[in-house]
Image (cartoon, rainbow, N blue to C red):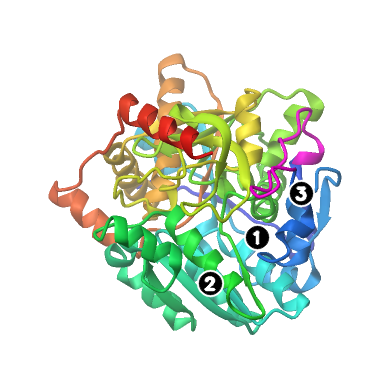
Amino acid sequence: MSTKQKRYFLTEEEIPTQWYNIQADMVNKPLPPINPATKQPLKPEDLFPVFAEELCRQELDQEHAWVDIPEEVRDMYKYYRSTPLVRAYGLEEAIGTPAHIYFKNESVSPVGSHKLNSALAQAYYCKKQGITNVTTETGAGQWGAALSYAAKVFGLEAAVYQVKISYNQKPYRRSIMQTYGAQVTASPSMSTRAGKDILTKDPNNQGSLGTAISEAIELALNTPNCKYTLGSVLSHVTLHQTIIGLEAEKQMAKAGEYPDIVIGCFGGGSNFGGISFPFMRHNILEGKKTRFIAAEPASCPKLTRGVFQYDFGDVAGYTPLLPMYTLGHNFMPANIHAGGLRYHGAGVIVSQLLKDKLMEAVDIKQLESFDAGMLFSQAEGIIPAPESCHAIAAAINEAKKCKETGEEKVILFNLSGHGLIDMAAYDQYLSGSLQNYEVTDEDVAKNIAELEKVI
């Protein structure tokens, strides 16, 4: 491991006071979400039964590029922000690349991931509206842990539906949520109509983010003074996460460099958009040529092999119809350890940006992602979450290309969370029992064909 490491921080006064809304600057705005009942473009009030009202307005705002961060939220940010920007000298040496590699270390938050950036905001807006209860879904548990903590900070009761395979694979994440005072249920469950329907068809169903979303929304709609919160996919979530890229922009300036390539792992789009969108605005407004790469799992390849069309964000069809790259809301992903990336669709902003070729996507096999995580751990001393390993793998691939060409490019990636609660996955990797999962073109085509009959 290299003993040479350079970290860049911001002063308390330098922490951003506004989030960045890229929709205001996009030439081609995302298509509107559709109300499935009326088949008309969604209005903010259509979402009021599900989300806090201010979050509904943020979701559909395509006018304001900058949104003030409430002082109460910014005060909580100061507990752990700014997060460090790190020059990864050890990783550069291990690869033997002339590239300069930087990572934004979001694993230093109290819950160990970037998810707290939006959880605090969503809990605040719920509390401000007088809401007393919140529900949500979670895959690997990072978002569930963040929402559980944020709910406790603002005096709310939280109920979390955790995807069943992750509920069993990652018992300590479940314990973390319960330690913060949340009620945690494995999804699909028998506690909701959506869960019962799924289990009736498939009693051994191990769940997906789509199933857990359905259950959490149903609970919110049937519980007095309760709202649903979401950890990724939707535009207001990505808005809150731009605190990552806005800090990184200032920190890169302190380092005297600017990224040629920005990379984030990809499940629904929150951490990728969070690191990318503040830099992408310079491509849109100033003609800069930075490349943006979303790294998704080969077992759930919506960006690289999905189709762009309107689809539901959940299995039961409780959400609006969203214009996105999707594998179909009925897609059941393989049981990979990167539980936060096991989602069938992509956020509407990212989908439009990919459609317009303002960003790229790559798919990473599970074993390749853990190979990258091991190299990073040994080079930089941080064990990354399985989700983050996908971004690391993509960064290593780009750094190897620089080694071949001799180009001294600047690569920035988001380390979205640590893997200290994911050691069971590393145990499987080290024992040789971890395996790759890929979907065939035939499977994708069949699933999409079924989807088209549904909608």
Decide whether the magenta segment is chiefly helix, strand or loop: loop
Residue under circle 3?
A: 60
**Residue occupying the point 27% across, 56% down:** 202
Closer mark to the observer between disc 3 and disc 1: 3
Magenta segment, which residues? 23-40
Give the class, few, some or many, for how many residues have Cα within 10 Å of label 1's Cα (few <14, many ≥20): many
Considering only vertical position in the picture, is 448 above or below 59?
above
Residue 335, percent across and down?
A: 29, 50
Left or right: 310 in relation to 58: left
Give the class, few, some or many, for how many residues have Cα within 10 Å of label 2's Cα (few <14, many ≥20): many
The three-letter code of the residue at mark 1 reads Ser
Residue under circle 1?
A: 82
Circles 3 and 2, Cβ within 8 Å, touching? The answer is no
**Residue occupying the point 48% across, 80% down:** 182
Query: What's the CA distance linking mark 3 and mark 1?
Result: 28 Å
Tag 2 or tag 3, which sits nearer the N-term? 3
Tag 2 or tag 1, which sits nearer the N-term? 1
Closer mark to the observer between disc 1 and disc 2: 2
**Residue occupying the point 74% across, 65% down:** 12
The three-letter code of the residue at mark 2 reads Leu
Left or right: 40 in relation to 431: right
Query: What's the CA distance linking mark 3 and mark 2?
Result: 24 Å
Query: What's the CA distance linking mark 1 and mark 2?
Result: 35 Å
Q: In the picture, residue 200 is in which quadrant?
A: bottom left
Residue under circle 2?
A: 219
Residue 357, percent across and down?
A: 62, 23
Q: Nearer the viewer, residue 166 or 428?
A: 166
